Image (cartoon, rainbow, N blue to C red):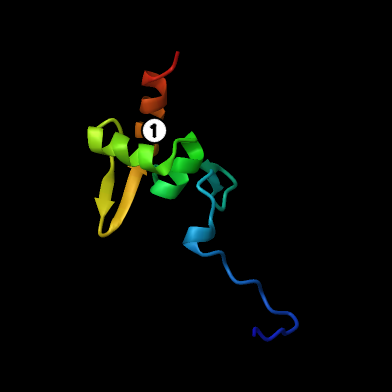
Amino acid sequence: MQRLTRNRAPEPAKADEIDAGNRSDPAGQEIKPLSVRISAAVKMTGIGRSKLYELIQEGAIDIVKIGSSTLIPVESLERLLERNRR
């Protein structure tokens, strides 16, 4: 059970709670993410998780591994959608 106190500043959001959308820097300018995690890529594209992994295996989507994290460059997702546009 969490204890409630007065005048307590709210805790900052954790990295996994932050949406994959654009963020603002202190000057108020929007910052577009260079890469996103798998879960964010699924939300951004509307592609299912399994299909996304298939596309990664086929080489249709680039990935970047940093430690155990798998990141997908947003540019790679944009190219995928552009290639499959009808």
Viewer-proximal residue, 24 or 44? 44
Q: Is residue 75 above or below residue 4?
A: above
Viewer-proximal residue, 57 or 9? 57
- In the drawing, does residue 57 fall left or right of residue 15? left
Residue appearing at x 44%, y 39% in the figure: 48
Residue 76 percent coordinates (x, y): 34, 33
Q: Which residue is mark 1?
A: 77
Residue 62 placement: quadrant: top left
Q: Is residue 84 visible?
A: yes
In the picture, the quarter occupied by the N terminus is: bottom right
Residue appearing at x 49%, y 35% in the figure: 46
Residue appearing at x 60%, y 46% in the figure: 28
Given the image, on which type of amino acid does mark 1 rest?
Leu
Residue 77 placement: quadrant: top left
Residue 4 placement: quadrant: bottom right
Q: Is residue 33 visible?
A: no
Residue 7 percent coordinates (x, y): 74, 80
- In the drawing, does residue 81 fall left or right of residue 27? left
Neighbourhood count class around disc 1 (C-alpha, 10 Å): few under 14, some 14–19, many 20 upward: some
Q: Secondary structure at mark 1?
A: helix
